[in-house]
Amino acid sequence: MSTPSATPSFTILGTGSHAPSQVVTNDDLATSIETSDEWIHSRTGIRARHLSGPEDTTTRLAVNAARAALLDANLAANQIDLLIVATCTPDLPMPSTASLVQNELGLSPRAACFDLNAACTGFVYALDTAWAMLSSGRYHHALVIGAEKMSTVLDWTDRTTCVLFGDGAGAIILGPAPADHPASGILAARLGTIPSTSDLLRIPGGGSSPLTPEARRYITMKGREVFKFAVRGMEEVARELLAEQGLATENIALVVPHQANLRIIHAISEYLEVPRERFFINVERYGNTSAASIPIALDEARRAGRVQRGDLVLLVAFGAGLTYGGALVRW
Ligand code: ACO
């Protein structure tokens, strides 16, 4: 939990997103695996996802999203002095994707650049980390990116997982609140990890653990358990954030949740008693893009006019770990 009080307000100055051009529908998937649009859509809300070709690396997706965010914030690349890329599908074990992005964007050599892995909660973890670093007074403008090429960690013969995910990237620029709108800013953020749940969602091979026929570099998931923890974790973090700020669910103008599954989003809407109309949902068109899902959704929500000046926006996520996190932002 972090709520710096005497520090200046830091806010989201711009957003951007990018998805590869190839759109694969549920019907397309049903031509190669035993599944159907009806099964996938009724259980997840997903109709299609964007998938990358070989040229669309995680870095490339991230760079495109970052360029759009810089343009939106009206900032030049050399004004960024902190870059965090949230990803669990980096191009390489090293250097970091952030180093590759820095190079392509032409950021200052003084910019601190690193990757952060909290799986699907990665963007919220990166947002809180960037906020804390800016609040230290040592950094001025942060570029925070969630970028994933999930298609590289899916077993395309495993219908229980491959239908759920997609590729893409979203980015934000964090910086001092503008003089004409000093009330805007990150109000609070809270992160956590649920003990003894690391086996529920994982890529068992491909790190320093050896690859074996059993431990391959593909996602495995115990879907039903993940579902329960996801709903509970996101509801709790949202309630804690609101209570900490003396706010109520009625004050929330828009919830931008992690886009993993429509039924999870509907369950949170019910438990929090925030009507579905106040959730931004695009899982139907993207599937689960992991760390990219919230920044893509936030960018689409803004560009669709769903976020207005003064609005209170709740970001809330869960992912492998199992990690969870949330942030309250005054627009
Ligand atoms: N098409 C057709 N049938 C399928 C498919 C498919 N794509 N996948 C599984 N089935 C079958 C199963 O084999 C099973 O058949 P059986 O009864 O003959 O054994 C049947 O459908 C039911 O399978 P379940 O896994 O029990 O289905 P469930 O209703 O639990 O739905 C789902 C699965 C959608 C994954 C659900 O558990 C869920 O949404 N969990 C949340 C997980 C989640 O959101 N993960 C995201 C990752 S978290 C993060 O963001 C990183």
Image (tube, helix red, strand yellow):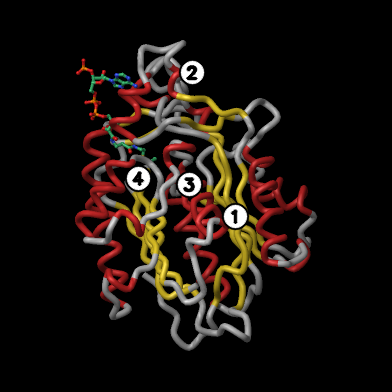
Q: Nearer the viewer, residue 298 or 304?
A: 304
Q: In which quarter of the image is residue 94?
A: top right
Label 4 environment density (alpha carbons within 10 Å; few <14, some 14–19, many ≥20): many
Residue beneath disc 4: 321
Residue beneath disc 1: 171
Judged from the image, the quadrant occupied by ligand 1 is top left
- Vertical comparison of 308 with 208: above or below: below
On the image, the x and y values in percent for residue 324 come to 34, 54
Amino acid type of disc 2?
Asp
Ligand 1 within 8 Å of the CB at mark 3: yes
Residue beneath disc 3: 293
Label 1 vs label 3: CA separation?
Answer: 10 Å
Label 3 environment density (alpha carbons within 10 Å; few <14, some 14–19, many ≥20): many
Residue beneath disc 2: 28
Q: Nearer the viewer, residue 317 or 108?
A: 317
Q: Which of 209 and 221 is in front in this view?
A: 221
Give the left or right position of residue 308, taking residue 174 as reference. left
Give the left or right position of residue 246, taking residue 64 as reference. left
Tag 4 near tag 1, CB within 8 Å: no
- Vertical comparison of 219 with 148: above or below: above
